[in-house]
């Protein structure tokens, strides 16, 4: 019997690569994002190259009841979600005080609330079936405070802590939860966060491909890892951060990010 994976933020970057990889592994897909054209193109390519079916659901996850609506639509199609990939998320390169508060609120809704809601609704079905896998895309940003990207870094800290806690709760039900913690990755993130030509992060820290991150995330999820890094260097750096004062970690992150006022 074919299994189904639901991927949020499937229209680009890591979400697209995870969708392609899961299709190659034989999963039917539910592709979720706001961009109709991108999702329809991805659906066509996936169904052409793999013997699977892909459903497209357009949803703005920053809206208050978006995930409940998504869940209800999936249930109305009588589809059981075996793998949940919470990939949707974005950042904003700016000082928090004085920033666009509506964008900051939307970021918290997508990066935190939508992710937690998806785990709540789809995770409940997995718990009843006593089977399922959840992959939450966090970041190495989860381990330190991030000046000039304060909400983004804090939201990824939530994803990491939340994932590890729920992983413990669901273990006895044979449901695994994995927090994927990549470093800078070549996706549309830089443009969406208004970092292009402003932040020095992508110059100071060599980004990796979204395809590589997807492969690492898939392997970590299938093995039931609670936290999955994309390189030994990232693992060592985040381990070291646990023993460094937060003010020094914040200073380091500010140096990496650069100053948006300049």
Image (spheres, rainbow, N blue to C red):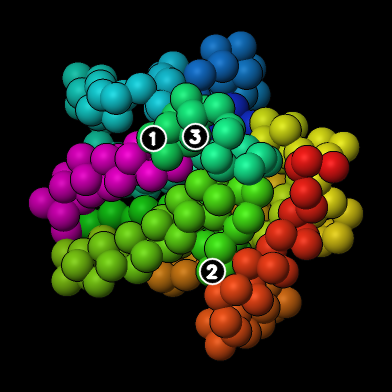
Residue that protrudes farthest toward the left in the picture: 128
Q: Which residue is mark 2?
A: 143
Disc with the residue nearer the chain's start (3 vs 2) = 3
| Secondary structure mostly seen in the magenta stretch | helix
Relative image position of residue 53 (x, y in whole percent) = 45, 26
In percent of width and height, residue 120 lies at: 22, 45
Q: Please report the residue visible at 85 percent of the width from the left and 42 percent of the height from the top.
A: 262
Looking at the rendering, which quadrant does residue 186 occupy? top right
Q: Is residue 84 visible?
A: yes
- The residue under label 1 is 109
Helix, strand or loop for disc 3: helix
User: SS for tag 1?
Assistant: helix
Residue at image x 63%, y 43%?
95
Q: Is residue 37 depicted above or below 80 in this figure? A: above
Viewer-closest of 185 and 71 = 185
Q: CA distance from mark 2 to mark 1?
A: 20 Å
Q: Nearer the viewer, residue 144 or 13?
A: 144
* Residue reaching furthest to the front: 98
Mark nearer the viewer, 3 or 2 = 3
Cα gap from disc 1 to disc 3, whole angstroms: 9 Å
User: At 78% from the left edge and 41% from the top edge, which residue is drawn?
Assistant: 261
Q: Residues within 10 Å of mark 3 (few under 14, many from 20)?
A: some
Which residue was labeled with disc 3?
A: 104
Tell me the magenta residue range: 111-130
């Amino acid at each position: 019997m074919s299994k189904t994976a639901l991927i949020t933020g499937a229209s680009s970057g890591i979400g697209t690569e995870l969708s392609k990889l899961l299709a190659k592994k034989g999963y039917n897909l539910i592709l979720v994002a706001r961009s109709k054209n991108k999702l329809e193109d991805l659906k066509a390519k996936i169904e052409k190259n793999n013997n699977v079916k892909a459903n497209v659901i357009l949803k703005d996850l920053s809206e208050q009841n978006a995930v409940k609506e998504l869940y209800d639509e999936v249930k109305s199609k009588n589809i059981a979600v075996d793998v949940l990939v919470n990939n949707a998320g974005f950042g904003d390169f700016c000082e928090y005080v004085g920033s666009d508060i509506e964008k900051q609120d939307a970021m918290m809704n997508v990066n935190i609330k939508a992710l937690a809601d998806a785990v709540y609704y789809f995770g409940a079905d997995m718990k009843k079936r006593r089977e399922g896998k959840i992959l939450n895309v966090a970041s190495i940003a989860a381990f330190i405070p991030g000046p000039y990207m304060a909400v983004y870094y804090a939201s990824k800290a939530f994803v990491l802590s939340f994932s590890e806690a729920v992983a413990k709760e669901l273990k006895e039900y044979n449901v695994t939860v994995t927090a994927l913690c990549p470093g800078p990755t070549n996706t549309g993130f830089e443009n969406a966060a208004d970092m292009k030509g402003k932040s020095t992060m992508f110059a100071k820290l060599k980004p990796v491909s979204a395809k590589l991150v997807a492969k690492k995330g898939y392997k970590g999820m299938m093995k039931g890892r609670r936290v999955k890094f994309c390189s030994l260097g990232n693992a060592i750096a985040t381990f070291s951060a646990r023993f460094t004062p937060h003010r020094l970690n914040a200073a380091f992150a500010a140096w990496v990010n650069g100053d948006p006022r300049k």
